[in-house]
Amino acid sequence: MELQDSEIIFLVEDASEGGFLARSADDTVFTEANTFEELRAAVKDAVRCHFEEPDRPRLIRLHYVRQEVFAA
């Protein structure tokens, strides 16, 4: 698997029950945690588990997505 510039992008969202959810942009890797610090460690661990050493991305990018809905 060849990744552009050896980077993987995760979309991070607030979990409805608290904490954070993170999924890779291509939806192949998913993890969750209670705090953002724990999420960083969980994402790193998920990437290590999902990719073999020669194919493992060198960089992980977390893109925090926040939706807000309010009355007009």
Image: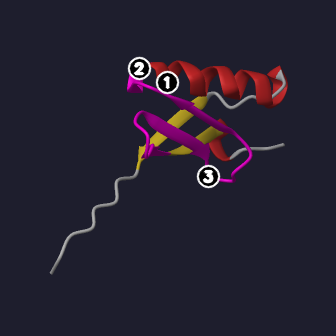
Vertical arrangement, residue 53 with respect to residue 62, above or below: above
Q: Which residue is mark 2?
A: 37
Q: Please tell me which residue is depicted at 80% across the width and 29% down the height of the picture.
A: 51
Is 13 placed left or right of 26 in the picture? Answer: left
Classify mark 1: helix, strand or loop.
helix
- Structural crowding at the residue carrying mark 1, measured as other residues with C-alpha within 10 Å and reported as few (<14), some (14–19) or many (≥20): some
Q: Are marks 2 and 3 in contact (CB under 8 Å)?
A: no
Question: Which of the marked residues, 1 or 3, is nearer the chain's N terminus?
Answer: 3
Kindly identify the amino acid type of the residue bearing the numbered disc 1.
Arg
Tag shown at residue 40? 1
State how far apart marks 2 and 3 are (Cα): 20 Å
Looking at the image, is mark 2 or mark 3 earlier in the sequence? Answer: 3
* Residue 45: quarter of image: top right
Q: Are marks 1 and 2 in contact (CB under 8 Å)?
A: yes
Locate residue 70, reporting x and y percent: 21, 70
Q: Between residues 57 and 10, which one lies in front from this camera angle?
A: 10
Left or right: 38, with 23 as reference point: left
Q: CA distance from mark 1 to mark 2?
A: 5 Å
Tally the numbered discs.
3
- Which range of residues does the magenta coloring cover? 12-37
Residue sitting at x 79%, y 44%: 2
